[in-house]
Image: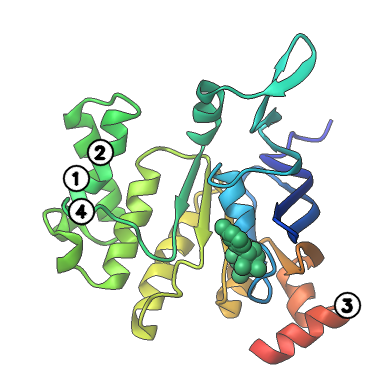
Amino acid sequence: MTEQPMVRFENVSKRYGSLTVLDGLDLEIKRGEKVSVIGPSGSGKTTVLRMLMTLETINDGVIWVEGEPLTHMQRNGKLVPADINHIRKIRAKIGMVFQSFNLFPHMTAMANCIEAPITVLGMKRADAEARAADLLEMVGLGQKKGHYPSQLSGGQQQRVAIARALAMRPKIMLFDEVTSALDPELVGEVLEVIRKLGREHDLTMLMVTHQMGFAKEFSDRVCFFHAGKICEQGPPKELFGAPKNERTQQFLRAVL
Ligand code: ADP
């Protein structure tokens, strides 16, 4: 028997008024798989992550996480709309890092990393602090625990944001153009942290990125989005080396 996918988008559509942003999307992500999403601006890439994070509603279709529907639950053999506890339970499996860091500005790096573990997971402060200290160390910020976001560079803030997401022990990490807001010289340090995380084989990672070199070297699979659909997908060597679809070829010619 094949293993249950970690995430499955089944015929998922998203519309804003008359604009169809995702058009019957089917996408399966295996446990531990590292998937990069590339494509032109406006093709629906960010929407995919936001829907998985339940930051957007879905118009049609179902998103499954470890075999459970995200926005619905099984009751007496039928799918009914999920209640908030069900959504929270599934969401707890997912962490997201945004383009714009989104740290709490009035809290230190450490406080940013312990807030949700204490309030949402009910962790003891001492345990949350010990874990946050390990994570801040892992992202290379062991010496910056007491700094506020305004005292940190963009790259450092983004590394705190990664540590903060990991503090909730997610099984799935979503990265939404996490280096796009950074000065070029700060991009490498953030990608290095993601690379390090990638070596943890258990963590499933879905990443929207414009860093083609990184997508090529890091991902198990790359999905090229165009107009709300996956136009082409495959191992990075194939997708970058010998794209089959005309649109993928055009896009890669323009960005590489
Ligand atoms: P990408 O990440 O590929 O650039 P997005 O997923 O951000 O694309 O957006 C896809 C399309 O949906 C774009 O045309 C965008 O303008 C539109 N869109 C995104 N969010 C909203 C919203 N809240 N209201 C209306 N349109 C939106």
The quadrant of the rendered image in which ligand 1 is seen is bottom right
The disc, 3 or 2, on the residue closer to the chain's N-terminal end is 2
Colour setting: rainbow
Marks 3 and 2, how far apart in space? Answer: 47 Å
The numbered disc on residue 109 is 4
Identity of the residue furthest to the left in this view: 146
| Mark 2 surroundings: few (<14), some (14-19) or many (≥20) residues within 10 A | many
In the rendered image, which quarter is residue 111 located in? Answer: top left
Marks 4 and 1, how far apart in space? Answer: 6 Å
The disc, 2 or 4, on the residue closer to the chain's N-terminal end is 4
Look at the image and tell me whether residue 256 can be seen.
no
Q: Which of 67 and 72 is in front in this view?
A: 72
Residue hosting label 2:
115
Amino acid bearing label 3: Lys
Amino acid bearing label 1: Ala
The disc, 4 or 3, on the residue closer to the chain's N-terminal end is 4
The N terminus, quarter of image? top right
Q: Do the residues under discs 2 and 1 have CB atoms within 8 angstroms?
A: yes
Query: Which residue corresponds to the image point at 51% horizontal and 49% vertical from the top-left?
Result: 173
Amino acid bearing label 2: Glu
Q: Position of residue 61 (x, y in %)?
A: 78, 40
The numbered disc on residue 111 is 1
Tell me the SS state at disc 1: helix
The C terminus, quarter of image? bottom right
Q: Is ligand 1 less than 8 Å from the beta carbon at label 1?
A: no
Q: Is ligand 1 less than 8 Å from the beta carbon at label 3?
A: no
